[in-house]
Image: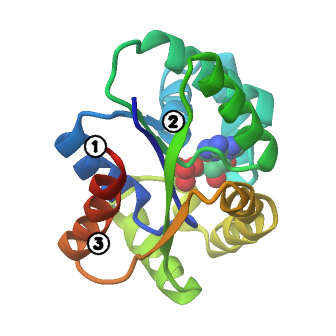
């Protein structure tokens, strides 16, 4: 099993590239943002609680997303690997993920870290808001909050995996095809 984390700030292209990577490699895509939006759409108690935090650009509590990931890992035995997108977002989530994977005799193979400048992130999210219907993309103050939360709470995840020598930085500006090629080259160099 080969597991990878597609890492980067909001708007760095994780969702777009994830779709292509799962089509090519057959990984199981685990996006905590998508899982939370599904809870909201189904009007579950968890979804209702999460929505108010997401609308403010704040993180949902660690135990909530760790629980969702733990269930998803158990629900998908026999996949070639998991592609984590938007998770882990805190060091506590990273440590929990490492433990859950080690219980399955597995680990993270690589963390691909998409590098995109802040002004480009903001303009991508503003554009995405026009078609995604995502309320957290529409408000400039919420976008800024998400970037601040990313820098404060999520960047340390790259330090965690950097210490384990698992982080590869990939230029996230350019055509979707070019970026995809760079990502697949890094995966193919490790997943054989
Ligand atoms: P995303 O789709 O990854 O941009 O996530 C949208 C929102 O969902 C985030 O701004 C958070 O409020 C929440 N969220 C998604 N993933 C996580 C996570 N791993 N930990 C905490 N909150 C999350």
In this figure, which residue is indicated by the disc labeled 1?
A: 192
Disc 1 crowd, CA 10 A, few/some/many (<14, 14-19, 20+): few
Residues under numbered marks 2 and 1 in contact, where contact means CB atoms less than 8 Å apart: no
> How far, Cα to Cα, is label 3 from label 1?
21 Å
x, y percent for residue 51? 66, 38
Quadrant of the snapshot with the N terminus:
top left
x, y percent for residue 42? 50, 20
Residue at figure coordinates x 68%, y 50% from the top left: 89
Against 192, is 66 above or below?
above
Badge 1 marks a residue whose secondary structure is: loop
In this view, the mark in front (2 or 3): 3
Quadrant of the snapshot with the C terminus:
top left
Task: Tally the numbered discs.
Answer: 3
In this figure, which residue is indicated by the disc labeled 3?
A: 179
In this view, the mark in front (2 or 1): 1
The image quadrant of residue 47 is top right
Disc 2 crowd, CA 10 A, few/some/many (<14, 14-19, 20+): some
> How far, Cα to Cα, is label 2 from label 3?
26 Å
> How far, Cα to Cα, is label 2 from label 1?
34 Å
| Circle nearer the N terminus (3, 1) | 3
In this view, the mark in front (3 or 1): 1
Badge 3 marks a residue whose secondary structure is: helix
Q: Which mark is residue 37?
A: 2
x, y percent for residue 96? 74, 32
Residue at figure coordinates x 56%, y 20% from the top left: 105
x, y percent for residue 82? 42, 33
**Some atom of ligand 1 lies within 8 Å of the CB belonging to the residue at label 2:** yes
| Residue 1 seen anywhere in this rendered image of the structure | yes
| Circle nearer the N terminus (2, 1) | 2
In the displayed structure image, the side of residue 101 where residue 76 appears, left or right: left
Front residue of 133 and 168: 168
| Circle nearer the N terminus (2, 3) | 2
């Amino acid at each position: 099993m080969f597991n990878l984390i597609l890492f980067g700030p909001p708007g760095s292209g994780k969702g777009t590239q994830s779709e292509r990577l799962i089509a090519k490699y057959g990984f199981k895509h685990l996006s905590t943002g998508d899982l939370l939006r599904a809870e909201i759409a189904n009007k579950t108690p968890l979804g209702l609680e999460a929505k108010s935090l997401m609308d403010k650009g704040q993180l949902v509590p660690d135990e909530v997303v760790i629980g969702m990931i733990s269930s998803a890992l158990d629900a998908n035995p026999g996949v070639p690997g998991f592609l984590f997108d938007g998770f882990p977002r805190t060091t506590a989530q990273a440590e929990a993920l490492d433990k859950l994977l080690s219980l399955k005799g597995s680990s993270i193979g690589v963390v691909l870290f998409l590098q995109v400048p802040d002004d480009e992130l903001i303009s991508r999210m503003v554009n995405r808001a026009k078609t995604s219907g995502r309320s957290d993309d529409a408000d400039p103050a919420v976008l800024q909050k998400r970037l601040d939360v990313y820098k404060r709470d999520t960047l340390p995840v790259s330090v965690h995996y950097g210490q384990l020598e698992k982080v590869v930085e990939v230029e996230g500006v350019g055509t979707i095809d070019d970026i995809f090629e760079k990502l697949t080259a890094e995966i193919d160099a490790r997943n054989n």
